[in-house]
Structures are given as C-alpha cells and as structure tokens.
Image (tube, helix red, strand yellow):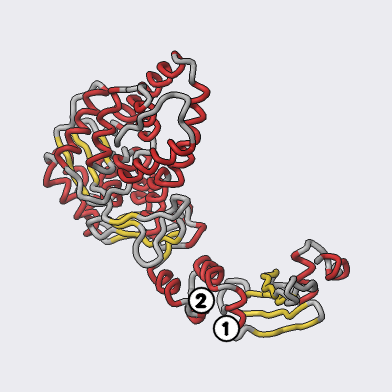
Amino acid sequence: MSSTQLVVGNAGEDAIAKHVARCKTVAFNVSACNKQKAQDAVSKIYATAGFRPPQYFVWFASPFAGSLAAVLLSKTNESYFENVITKLKGRCSTQLWQMIEAKGTSLWWGNVRDALTREIDKSFGTIPQQTRLAILAFLIGPVGPRLSMQNLASVDMELAPPKLTQGIIGELSKVLPARYTEPLTTYGERGLSASVANSAISYIGKAGYGNQDADLPFYDFCRGAGFKIPDMDGFFQLANVGGWWWPFQDFCIMVEKPSQITVDSEGLLHHELTSALAYRDNWKTFAWHGVFVPDRFLTFAKRRNVDDILMEPNVELRRMMLDMYGLDNFINDSGAQKIQEDKCGILYRQEFGDDDEPLVIVKVINSTPEPDGTYNIYFLRVPPTTMTAREGIAWTFGLTPDEYFPLRET
C-alpha cells in the first residue's frame, strides 16, 4: 500500500476517499501471488513478533481449502495467531496511539479512524466475514438472506466425499514431514462432517487476511502523516503480494488471491452475470448484494421469467425474485386469482403449492390526482389472511376496515 502524504489538520472526506481508492486497488488485486515474497513477508512478521520464522509453507488456492487444512492441523498443532498477529498488532497499536497522543491529536485521529473504517467496510472490510458465509453456503446450499451458522449445526450428514479431505491431506503431505500429517489419516477415510466443516469456518477468525486486511489502511494513513510504525512493515509487504494465511509454530498455511471479486456500493459481494467471488481451484460463490444464491438466480435476473418464480423451491429466493420482478408485473403475468373488489381496490391471491404462505396483493388507485390529472396505481402486499381490498389497505395504515376512510388517509 502506498502512503498518503498528509499534514495533520487538512484531512477531510476527500483525503479519506482517495486513500480508500488506493487501498481498494490492493484489496481487489486478482493477479497471482508472488509466493516467495509472500513467504518472506510472513517470515518478517514472525521475526518482528519475536519468533522463529516457519520452516514450511503450504499453499492452497482458496480460503475454503486453506481453512479446512488449518483446522485439521490445529488438532495436533498450536495456532500462532495470537503470537504473531494479535499480540504484534496490539503492540503496534499501542505505539501508534502513544505517538498520536504525544502530539495532542488523539481526538482528531480517532475521528479519522472511525470515518476511514466506515468507508473501508463499504469497500472490502467485511469480505473475510462474507467469505465465511460463502463457504457455509457452498457446503449446505444457498438458503437466502437467513443464512447462518445454525443451518450448519443442524446438518447431520457428510457434506463432501472423502476425496475432498484426502486431497487436502495429500497437499499437506507434499510439503510437511510425516509427523505433522500422519495424525490426519483418519480424516481422509470419511467424508467432511458438519462438525469439521463448522470448525473450519470458525477458524477463519484465526487467519491473517493479507491484501484484504482491513487494519492496514489506518496505519497507512497515519504513516503518511509521519506516524510510522516499522513493526507493521511485514503486514504491508504481505498485502502487496499475498492473500490469507494461517500461522502455526513450525509452518504456515498460505492462500492465493482470488481470480474474481466484485462487490456493490456497500461492499457486499455481488455480480449480476457470474460468480462474485472465485479462486483458482474453481471454488466460487454467486452473490446478489451480499446474499448467496445458486447460479439459477442469476439466470432469472437476466431473463425475468414469471415461471421461474412459480417453480422456485427456495422460499427466500422466491421472495427475492418477487422483489426484483415487481408485484405489479407479477400480478399481470402470473395469472393471479382476483378474489375480491370494492371501491377501495382489487384483491389478488397467488398460491405457490408448498409451505410458503400465499401471496396476497391489493391493487389500489390513489384517490387524489397528480398535477397532470392522472391517478397513480399501487400494488401493496398484505397479510395472507386478508379477505377484502378495504381490509388490506386499512392494514397498511395500521387501521381496521371500519376505521379506514380513503380520502382522510390519502
């Protein structure tokens, strides 16, 4: 990352925006890792933290494979996350704020940090957490906006065939001596269980994030103003050449950078045509504004076919499709049943034939004209128990049918 040249007192929104833009070029760099330079940077971090650098480096193409390898090895090897990342960064943070306080500008820099953090989160700061959920969605299937670890906890089955863990162990065995990999042989004899997968996903919190490290932009901003912390240099070097990493005493699990990564304006993984996040081992995920979806959802997004909505088995995805398609278009195109009409509007109902509640919509014409003399038409979703248009419109105002007077509410 390149430093921002800055004089204390003149940093505003423009300076922060320019700095975030520079940091994004690092975070979204999808070129292949320079593995030797990345290993040198990790070795420097170990040495700066006061520990002997790793003897072995094992590379994987994706955080899915890397997290699984790390959690398998953690059964018999101690993680050095606290030693070489948490404690070292804590020491650097103390040094930085001591320098800032000596200048009497801690309040000002606190505001800069908060503003910068907000912008980084809308750019790439939450990608590690989103990747954690992407791995979950990859294992158990996209389940819409309510995707959570509880979904995995309830799974009592093998999530992948034995060849997956056998492949991971095979890659480890190519680099690590047998004393590290022999205890793992029993894992390769069975499929990936929910408990191991759960541990692997949780172990993402014990990784360093390389070019996606959201701590670095603030340090970089500060060193542009003269507050330099040399002990952070290893992290900066790694951000320019490498991706995620899991530190252990004698070895380190390293992950290459993604081959594809796109987000929306809020920093949420998103792509309308293809995978939003992809790695060189073909591990990828499809996402729509941070919601992990199957590729058929992107097909729907391109062609907007009402039959896709009616046939979609996933309730959460169906609701997203409805929002995208528009209630008015859906009523017109789906053949929804007209069940009641009164002077307040028309009530429609569409059954989906599964456990999802029916879609009930009231069509209402605004009672007051627009300046050009036309009347706006609205389609409002109302509770499935609604029996009349008047009842549905009254519900949108928090009223009973007897309390609703159209002209007054308008």
Image quarter in which the N terminus is found: top left
In the picture, residue 156 is in which quadrant? Answer: bottom left
- For label 1, the crowd category at 10 Å Cα-Cα, with few meaning under 14, some 14 to 19 and many 20 or more, is some
Residue 13 position (above or below residue 266): above
Disc 2 marks which amino acid?
A: Ile
- From the top left corner, tell me how far across and down residue 134 is, in percent: 38, 55
Residue 334 position (above or below residue 402): below
Image quarter in which the C terminus is found: bottom right
Q: Residue at x 28, y 48 (%)?
A: 29
Disc 1 marks which amino acid?
A: Ser
Q: Real-space Cα distance between discs 1 and 2?
A: 9 Å
Q: Residue at x 46, y 37 (%)?
A: 117
Q: Secondary structure at mark 2?
A: helix
- From the top left corner, tell me how far across and down residue 89 is, in percent: 35, 27
Q: Is residue 176 visible?
A: yes
Identify the mark nearer the N-term, 1 or 2: 2
Q: Check contact, mark 1 vs mark 2: CB within 8 A.
A: yes
Which numbered circle lies on residue 334?
A: 1
In the picture, residue 353 is in which quadrant? Answer: bottom right
Residue 282 position (above or below residue 31): below
Q: Residue at x 66, y 85 (%)?
A: 337
Q: Which residue is disc 2 drawn over?
A: 309
Q: Residue at x 80, y 77 (%)?
A: 344
Q: Secondary structure at mark 1?
A: helix
- For label 2, the crowd category at 10 Å Cα-Cα, with few meaning under 14, some 14 to 19 and many 20 or more, is many
The answer to which of 381 and 302 lies nearer the viewer is 302
